[in-house]
Amino acid sequence: MPIEQSIGGKPAPAKPSERPLLRSLWRGFRLRCPNCGEGAMFGAYLKVNNACPHCGEELHHHRADDAPPYFTILIVGHLIVAGVMMVEDYFHPDYWVHILMWFPLTIGLSLWLLPRIKGALVGLQWALRMHGFAGPDAFDPANPPPDPGAG
Ligand SMILES: [Zn+2]
């Protein structure tokens, strides 16, 4: 007996809207709203808009905290250190060449990557319905509804 019939023939409840993980990550990385992919996620360099200017999806629920700089340092550090070691190994340039090359590259790559990683993390939280991204009726353990019996 199919499971639909075992609950009295009622139609299955409507599925919540789809939130594909990779699409949400990619849209966030492109600094776009994870819901529509059109509206800008950021109102300033790292300031996430309260809501998408295109579709109105609420974005203020994000809690990226210190994860974006953590991943930025992790990625940029591995790229730059590997680059320094390879260039030193193959070309043996003077130290001033290293300084002129790697300082601007480190700073530039970090500044370019930081908002993109933050956007991807906001997209991840949105796709996984973390924090308030699940909607007003979902239970959020970090912000439980008031207990009517208390007080
Ligand atoms: Zn949007």
Image (cartoon, grey):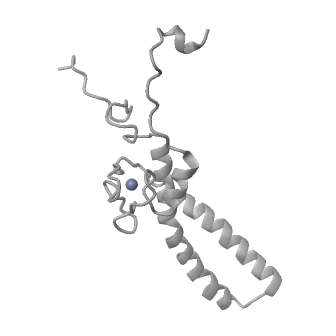
Rendering coords of residue 104 (x, y %): 56, 82
Residue under the point 54% across and 53% down: 25
Rendering coords of residue 79 (x, y %): 67, 69
Q: Is residue 102 above or below residue 1?
A: below
Q: Is residue 113 above or below residue 16?
A: below
Q: Is residue 32 above or below residue 21?
A: below
> In front: 116, or 24?
24
Rendering coords of residue 151 (x, y %): 17, 20
Residue under the point 47% across and 8% down: 8
Where in the image, quadrant-wise, is ligand 1 located?
bottom left
Q: Is residue 148 left or right of residue 4?
A: left
> In front: 23, or 128?
23
| Residue at the right extreme, as displayed | 90
Residue under the point 75% across and 75% down: 85
Q: Is residue 128 left or right of residue 48?
A: right
Q: Is residue 91 above or below residue 24?
A: below
Residue under the point 40% across and 64% down: 46
Image quarter in which the N terminus is found: top right
Rendering coords of residue 59 (x, y %): 36, 51
| Residue at the left extreme, as displayed | 151
